[in-house]
Amino acid sequence: MEIETIRQNGHAYVGSRESSVERELNGEIEAVELNGCSGSPKSVNGHIMKKPHHVVDTHDGRIKRKAKHLTQRQSSRGESNAITNGSGSAGMYSINGHSNNYVVPHRRWKNSRRSRNGYGRGLPKKGGAGGKGVWGLPGSEAFEELYEDENDPNYDSETNDKNIILSEVIPEISPEEFFKLAEPIVLEYYEHGDTHEVAVNLDDILTGLLRPYVISVLIEIAMDHKDSQREMTSVLVSDLYGRVITGKDIEKGFEMLLANLPDLILDTPEAATILGNFLARAVADDCLPPKFVTKPSEHGELSEHALAAIRRADTLLQMKQGWAHLDNVWGMGGPLRPVKTITKQMTLLLKEYLSSRDIQEAHRCLRALEVPHFHHELVYETVVMTLESLSQTTEEAMCELLSSLDKACLVLPASMEQGFLRVFDDMADIVLDVPLAYIILDRFMERCNRAGFVTDKILSNMPSRKIPIEQFLNIKRSSWRLENSVSDYEMRSYNQSTILSKLCSQLCSSLWSHPEPMPDLLSE
């Protein structure tokens, strides 16, 4: 508010331009003279009120100043009601030279709801809408996020995520946790043999720092299994190379195994030999450089067991046959071999048993084959070898072997039944080579039934060829005449198998000449 002191006709006037107080007092400010100054004849309660005249500015360029607020101060001399503009002294605006006793009327605070302390009364802000007892605009409840109040007792700070940027965070897992996650994946691989599925599962749990632990986990698990699972582990390492792990990861993994070898030997005494085989196989599969084995000094200080593993790998790599033989470094165990190879090994097993009669060794060899789903082939080969032997001693030995396999649960009843049924189906072809096959089969089946591992169900499916008793007696007489016709020289020169072959040919010709059903030969 701009204050002007005007002297006109010997009187002092205080004027202002368009202030808020002026609007309240009919557009003008009336100065109240407390000490009674002369001038205007109008008086109110002994006080003379002077109405200032408008001053005409004769100048063209009027100076416009910002309105200055009037304040009431207590002077240091004990004089009250001094009028100032907030910056100057109390006596700069005086009327008629008297002391500062001019007061601007106070603002009317009666019935005013405006706060006097500048902070408000703590009432809620309704956003300019709603009446008494109503909160906010109609429909504002649909936009709750726009009307959230942090002072509300039910306010949830977690819901206000406007300034939060979400990003994917993959937590790091420890090597122990990785071993627990990878172990079921490897054990499942030993069942299905699908390396692609293993690679996909490992990608889900692998991070950059854990990739060297893949080799360590695979080989540590393989040490507790058989050679067939170790062969599958070598194949898995070769398939994961370049896809899940790199050559550096494989080197770091083998270095970790060499460092932990003294602890691994406590659980697996042949751990050094097994690790040496894995090293040689990895070099042969181009997963490791040869210098990893030929230059052990680059790995720092190694324990005695670690040096033994490296020497084992170096010996395998320096063999004259080249690296091709390392494809069979774990032997020929497991179901990955051809059927003919497994059949040949079972035949060798039976021949070795007939020569040694060592049942425990036969059990060990059968377990080493690791083909429980193919045990029916062993039963089939056993029965066929018995039919071809034409010897009761062989029948007794084979019956004893099958009985021990059944009691030890190495051959399940289902595999036993399947093996005998395969023999029954092939009897039409077997009898061409062994004419007495039906007779020997009947006798062998009765022996096995008495041993307790052949059920009546299997016996009911057994085929038989029967001839009339008269023809059987004629065949028997002819066989005796054939034996008597052999001279002493022939008996000395011919062995028993030659004579039996002649008898079998005679019997076979007689049987085929009379194909009608016949009673059991052995019972007669």
Image (tube, rainbow, N blue to C red):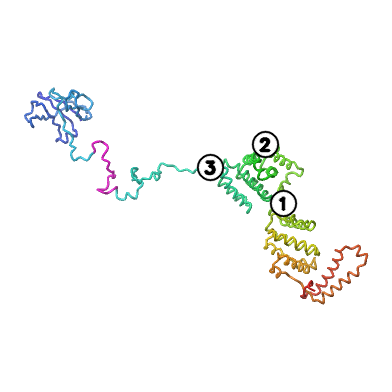
Q: Return the x and y of residue 431 as percentages of the image width and height.
A: 78, 67
**Mostly what secondary structure, the magenta segment?**
loop
Q: Confirm or deny contact between disc 3 and disc 1 (CB under 8 A).
A: no
* Mark 3 Cα-neighbour bin, 10 Å: few <14, some 14–19, many ≥20: some
At 78% from the left and 69% from the top, the residue drawn is 439
Residue that sits furthest to the left in the current view: 41
What secondary structure is found at the residue carrying circle 3?
loop
User: Where's residue 185, x and y in %?
Assistant: 59, 50
Residue at which label 2 appears? 302
Magenta region: 115-136
The kind of residue tagged 3 is: Glu
Image-quadrant location for residue 157: top left
Q: From the image, state whether disc 1 or disc 2 is nearer to you.
A: 2
Looking at the image, residue 196 lies above or below residue 467: above
Q: What kind of residue is marked 2?
A: Leu
Secondary structure category for the residue under label 2: loop
The residue beneath circle 1 is 332
Q: Is residue 237 positioned above or below 470 on the image? A: above
Q: Quadrant of residue 340?
A: bottom right
Q: Marks 3/1: CA distance? A: 41 Å
The amino acid beneath tag 1 is Met
Q: Is residue 59 above or below residue 418?
A: above
Ranked by sequence position, the earlier of labels 1 and 2 is 2
Q: What number is the disc on residue 172?
A: 3
Query: Viewer-nearest of labels 2 and 3?
Result: 2
Choose the circle earlier in sequence order: 2 or 3. 3
